[in-house]
Amino acid sequence: MLWATAAPAAATDPTQIEAPSGLRVVLQDYRDETDTPLAIFRARFVAPDLEQAAETMEAVFSDMEYLCNTVALPELVTRGLPAQRVVVSLSSEPLEFGTIAPDVAQFFESYSIEDATCIWELF
């Protein structure tokens, strides 16, 4: 089941989130897959400047963990979903779920949830 929703409010533009690295991202959508054996909740984000930011991979992955903890987890709590893990994806432009686009920068990270915190998993 696909759930699209607006991004959390930011200081100047309610559709943008500023990650700790300064990268500006927009929430594309959520995907509730908690009724599957892996019980996954997906949070998909778009960052038009991702390719430039990708030069510092550590910052991108830190931003993704931040998005998991500050955007995806609160949404899980609000919805009361029984997710066992959260998958955060970040792409340089909006894509339909599952689309392979070699010309579009895309990153994915998986997190287990422990003590109301996203814990990075080897994906």
Image (cartoon, rainbow, N blue to C red):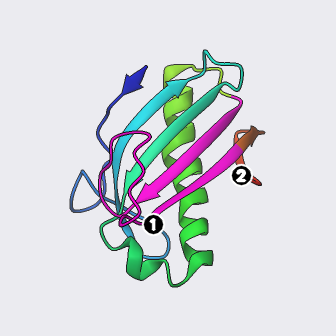
Relative side of 71 to 34, left or right: left
The one of 90 and 7 positioned closer to us in this rendering: 90
Q: Which residue is disc 1 drawn over?
A: 19
**Res 3 quadrant in image:** top left
The label nearer to you, 1 versus 2, is 2
Viewer can see residue 99: yes
Residue beneath the point at 66% across and 24% down: 39
Mark 1 element type = loop
Q: Earlier in the sequence, mark 1 or mark 2?
A: 1
Screen quadrant of the N terminus: top left
In x, y percent, where is residue 7? 33, 45
Mark 2 element type = loop
Residue beneath the point at 71% across and 19% down: 37
Residue beneath the point at 40% across and 39% down: 97
**Amino acid carrying mark 2 in the image:** Phe
Relative side of 119 to 81, left or right: right
Q: Which residues are magenta?
A: 84-111
The one of 44 and 9 positioned closer to us in this rendering: 44
- 90 in magenta: yes
Q: Which residue is disc 2 drawn over?
A: 123
